Image (cartoon, grey):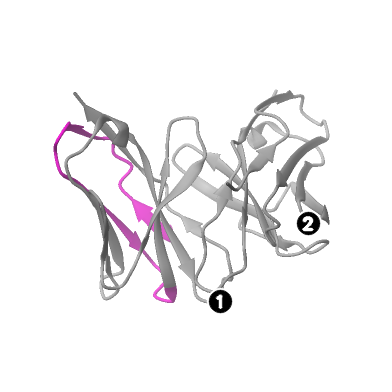
Amino acid sequence: RKEVEQDPGPFNVPEGATVAFNCTYSNSASQSFFWYRQDCRKEPKLLMSVYSSGNEDGRFTAQLNRASQYISLLIRDSKLSDSATYLCVVNMRNAGNMLTFGGGTRLMVKP
Amino acid sequence: DVKVTQSSRYLVKRTGEKVFLECVQDMDHENMFWYRQDPGLGLRLIYFSYDVKMKEKGDIPEGYSVSREKKERFSLILESASTNQTSMYLCASSQILAGLYEQYFGPGTRLTVT
């Protein structure tokens, strides 16, 4: 079983739609959680951290459910420029600065 | 802005060749990482370093070695390249700060071993 699992997609949505991705992690000792974004043929970049109480950054909302060991990313009012692969990333306790990456969920926003 | 650069964007090597991939960061970060990214497998950690001359194995170190002689530079070495090492290689760096885990990635090197 992978430590961080995501539905690879692709999720094909029209502009303006709301779309949500989930990610599950297997290690209950995980302590920090993130979403990274990776554009086609580009490097991953941090999109947002995920806090226990949930957090929002503009059209993006991240939620954490420790009991069920999953995190989610909600994108409202999708834009064409949101088309990318979204990577779920976890830091395990005692892992220092090491991060464990999910395989990514591909989002395609259509006009 | 943090900048992480990698020596080549594309590289083609023959089986059995020794391959050097170089990575340089300009933000005085302590940590540096080498990953490979393959379709369906995501990013997998090969090696990382938290200080000069220090290195730790990641999840898939077999067939690779690394060198960190200067803080800003982290090299990945394929001693004898094989076709199953054809992949996208990504270097990253990060600071050691409590609660700060953002890793900054280089643009990647697409290596093809024939």
Q: Does residue A21 belong to the magenta stretch?
A: yes
Chain letter of the residue beneath label 1 in the structure image: A
Query: Distance between the Cα atoms at labels 1 and 2?
Result: 23 Å
Front in this rendered view, residue A27 or A84: A84
The percent position of residue A32, horizontal first and vertical second, equals: 43, 69
Residue drawn 83% across and 54% down? B70
> Could you confirm whether marks 1 and 2 are on the same chain?
no
Residue located beneath label 1 in the image: A94
Residue drawn 34% across and 51% down? A6
Quadrant of res B48:
bottom right
Residue drawn 83% across and 35% down? B18
Please state which amino acid type lies under the numbered disc 2.
Lys
Front in this rendered view, residue A108 or B78: A108
Quadrant of res B90:
top right
Q: Which mark is residue B71?
A: 2
Q: Which residues are magenta?
A: A1-30
Q: Residues within 10 Å of mark 1 (few under 14, many from 20)?
A: few
Q: Is residue B48 visible?
A: yes
Q: Quadrant of the C terminus of chain B?
A: top right
Q: Residues within 10 Å of mark 2 (few under 14, many from 20)?
A: many
